[in-house]
Amino acid sequence: MMKILFAASEAVPFMKTGGLADVTGSLPGYFDKKHFDVRIIMPKYLCMDEKWKAQLRFVCHFYVNLSWRRQYVGIFETVQNGITYYFVDNEFYFAGDKPYHNIYEDVEKFAFFSKAVLEALPYLDFWPDVIHCHDWQTGLVPVFLRTFYGDQRCYSNIRTVFSVHNLKFQGRFSLPAVIDITGLPEQIFSSDKLESYGEANYLKGGVVYADAVTTVSPTYAREIMTPEGGEGLDGLMRAREGSLYGILNGIDIREYDPQTDAYLANHYNETNHTEGKELNKLKLQKLLGLPVDKDVFLLGMVSRMTDQKGFDLIAYVMDELMSTERLQLVVAGTGEARYEEMLRYFAEKYPQKIHVTIGYSEELAHRIYGSCDAFLMPSLFEPCGLSQLMSLRYGTVPIVRETGGLKDTVMPYNEYEQTGTGFSFANYNAHEMLGVLRYAMRVYYTQRKCWNGIAERAMREDFSWKKSAETYARLYEDIVGRP
Ligand code: GLC
């Protein structure tokens, strides 16, 4: 039995700010249980929902040294959907109303977490063969492991995987501060290790020290090796090319299933999706106060409102789109104030056509997937993207920019061969996006059979975790077998 420990700053259902949590919380459930025991360790945030906190069981406590500091660590555990979750407790670090605050607090917080993960192992009754780290918050785990624990055999046998879910976030901080926080010897801060552009960089630490590096789609793996997509680290990524794998994310197809989804008024599958979705659409329009009209093109978006997601393109052509085309737009999400305000502004300007919900509601998200005709995702960059996978599964035709995982998962419609599962455009250009939106609407309004064909092919695609879990399993076996 191979033992794998996921170390992450968030995982569903306990804490989620983005797609990372969907991955860390759902992937462990898809390994072959006869051969793999996959568990998760994450912080016990004070802002976690009471319902989850109440279910945690105290395991033990101890103290961990972080340079000159000596800090309390409590370990809690619970089993959720058959998966064991461990939680690191320390109310000094994990207090507050959200998991991340500012880089000042977060660098120390996640140095502490990374050290606590390694120190917790003797108490867990679960000695991992592999620690699988996710994003910069856990970048120091491989660094600490090799630097402080190298002479202890049980630790030196552990292999590490570091997964990049978004290269834009690196955990960069001033060198003297990180030296002081971590207690790592100065030679670790050379330019071939933790140093990057004059700062200490946690993500770089993970990438340099891990036995294998993965990211969440094959196209993104290629993009991050280029100056355009490398966020300043393309040289590093090229240096690790031999151990860099692009493994596509999946989705939890039990949770996202239009045949059973509890949030949907009406269930459907690939044979009856047209009628099935129509009823949902009418209900959603009614709920949101939009004109109830089964024939209008209903476009959805569920997204973090950041520049990554392409909101600048939308702002640029929104007036043109709304004043010339017959459509309704439904948006849900939270993020940067400038995008929230932009969307509110347009929703007020076009109350008959646009509805914007600032906030995150699982129910509304599911209803958007299960009711809209199409789903818009014009990302500037997209490591994998999960919303387009959910849209495909619900027969909601994705309209995307060809970047990262969007390029790997949405096959552009070909009207001559009647193939494809969505629409896409290549350049980060608002009028290119507008052009493809108009093309999609033309197909929708004038060739409905072809449109329905696209939706049906989308629904028949398989983006379950099964394939990816097998690929990770082979990777674990490969690195564990190495001397
Ligand atoms: C990040 C990326 C997104 C990816 C997710 C899970 O949120 O922006 O593209 O799907 O992580 O890997």
Image (spheres, rainbow, N blue to C red):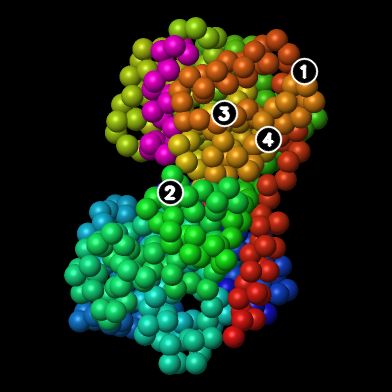
Q: Mark 1 is on which residue type?
A: Lys
Badge 2: few (under 14), some or many (20 or more) residues near its Cα, within 10 Å?
Answer: few
Instruction: Say which of 73 and 3 sits in front.
Output: 3
The residue that mark 3 highlights is 425
Secondary structure of the residue carrying numbered label 4: loop
Between disc 1 and disc 3, the foreground one is: 3
Compute the Cα span from label 1 to label 3: 23 Å
**From mark 2 to mark 3, how far is it between C-alphas?**
21 Å
Q: Which of the two marks, 2 or 3, is nearer to us in this view?
A: 2
Q: Which mark is residue 227?
A: 2
- Please report the residue visible at 43 percent of the width from the left and 70 percent of the height from the top: 208
N-terminal of the pair, mark 1 or mark 2, is: 2
Q: Residues within 10 Å of mark 1 (few under 14, many from 20)?
A: few
Q: Nearer the viewer, residue 155 or 362?
A: 155
Front-most of 383 and 97?
383
Left or right, 98 with respect to 133, comes to left
Mark 4 belongs to which amino acid? Met
Q: In what element is the residue under mark 2?
A: loop
The first of marks 2 and 3 along the sequence is 2
Residue 285 place in picture, x, y as percent: 54, 19
Whole-angstrom CA distance, mark 4 to mark 1, is 18 Å
Identify the residue position indicated by label 1 in the image: 449
276 up-or-down from 212: above or below: above
In the picture, which quadrant includes the N terminus?
bottom right
> What amino acid is at disc 2?
Pro
Q: What secondary structure prevails in the magenta region?
A: helix
Between the C-alphas of marks 4 and 2, the distance is 26 Å
Does residue 81 belong to the magenta stretch?
no
Say how many tags the image has.
4
Residue 78 visible to an observer of this rendering: no
Figure check: 335 above or below 299: below
State the CA–CA distance, disc 4 to disc 3: 11 Å
